[in-house]
Amino acid sequence: MVKITSDFDSGNIVPLDISDPTNLTLEIKPDGKADFFQWFYFRVEGGKGQPLTMRLKNAHGASYLGGWKDYRAVASYDNETWFRVDTSFDDRELTIQHTPDHDSVYYAYFAPYQTSRYRDYINKVKSSPQLSHQVIGQTLDGQEIDYFRMGDAERQLWVIARQHPGETMGSWWMEGFLDRLTDKANVDAQTLRDKATLHIIPCMNLDGARRGHLRTNAAGKDLNRAWRNASVEESPEVYLVREAMRASGVDFFLDVHGDEAIANNFLDAPKGIPSWDALHEKRFNRYSDRLLEISRDFQTKDGYPVPAPGKGNLDIANAYVAETWDCLSMTLEMPFKDANVNPMPEVGWSPERCRHFAGEHLKVMAEIVDFLR
């Protein structure tokens, strides 16, 4: 008989009936104080050589049904190397089928980035002389919110990731970004050190990440809908970062996310804000056009609909920051699926590809820093 567990950092699943390996029935748990759900991450033990069929019975009620179209779950034997497995959706259940080669195997919505890994990685980065580290406050669960700073020049560049905890590609991207910033030989990092002050929040939503949430923090708040009215009581993560931005000013802002439905990487600009004008458009196009030139993984055809003029949602980070500081402000969205412009079916969009993509963004930042004002 197989055993299914998710009682670990970032885990999420509810076993319903696991008596038959060919018909394992499961459910995804919603975020603790909100109805969002789609993230899953669990371990199966005792399944070596057995054709497992796992049915996620409540998939039809998930937050983003478009995320299941052409989607394939990820699996790993060691929590490090992840590969795609057969997955289907029949408008009711999400079915994962796989015959594992080992007794213990993990399955997830995307390659997890646990808070335990985060802490180990942050401790390594803190030792780098290239960056200075500060704890700017605590989450509702008492976790430290890490802030890194690099350089001391006039232009202020802010990069944050993982406002939505289930979008773990943000942490993999950030790992690649920080790896390059701490590399003394990286010429793009050196350019930014000389020409800008870089402010980095590697993980905005540590509580949601540890709890296995898709979208919200410990209070059930969607942090990327809290920027206009952030509070210490419900969204301290945003409140503290927003106050730090007010102290420094902002000339550039990149918010790193993942999108469930769109099978490509894209940038979203806050074109619906009241102050959007030709200069905003020029700044955004300079960044987007250059990224398109250098990256095989980026494209500009797929993305979100453009809001009507003046109808942008100022509760969202990129809109709030652009309107408040009149600066280049963007959301980067990466896929949970594969990237259609450069598909790799065995792994899909993956941690390795996230890390590489971060290096391409760093290059563009270094090239456009002189044109931010």
Image: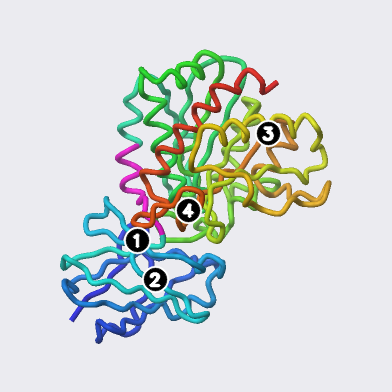
Which three-letter amino acid code belongs to the residue tagged 4? Glu
Q: Which residue is mark 1?
A: 84
Q: Quadrant of the C terminus?
A: top right
User: Residue, x 73% and y 30% (percent of image)?
Assistant: 282
Of residue 267 and residue 341, the one placed in the foreground of this image is: 341
Mark 2 touches mark 1? (CB < 8 Å): yes
Q: Secondary structure at mark 1?
A: strand
Q: Dot 4: few (<14), some (14–19), or many (≥20) neighbours within 10 Å?
A: many
In the rendered view, tell whether residue 108 sits above or below residue 344.
below
Q: Secondary structure at mark 4?
A: loop
Give the left or right position of residue 198, taking residue 319 as reference.
Answer: left
Give the spatial CA distance, label 4 vs label 2. Answer: 19 Å
Mark 3 touches mark 2? (CB < 8 Å): no
Give the spatial CA distance, label 1 vs label 3. Answer: 34 Å
- Residue mark closest to the camera, 4 vs 3: 3
Q: Dot 1: few (<14), some (14–19), or many (≥20) neighbours within 10 Å?
A: many
User: Residue, x 31% and y 48% (percent of image)?
Assistant: 116
- Residue mark closest to the camera, 4 vs 1: 1
User: Residue, x 50% and y 16% (percent of image)?
Assistant: 191
Q: Which residues are magenta?
A: 110-121
Which three-letter amino acid code belongs to the residue tagged 2? Thr
Q: Which residue is mark 4?
A: 167
User: Does label 4 or label 3 sit earlier along the sequence?
Assistant: 4
Q: Secondary structure at mark 2?
A: strand
Mark 4 touches mark 2? (CB < 8 Å): no
User: Does label 4 or label 1 sit earlier along the sequence?
Assistant: 1
Q: Which residue is mark 2?
A: 87
Give the spatial CA distance, label 4 vs label 1. Answer: 17 Å
Q: Which quadrant of the view contains residue 357? A: top left
User: Does label 4 or label 2 sit earlier along the sequence?
Assistant: 2
State the image coordinates of residue 206 (x, y, percent, origin top left). Answer: 44, 49
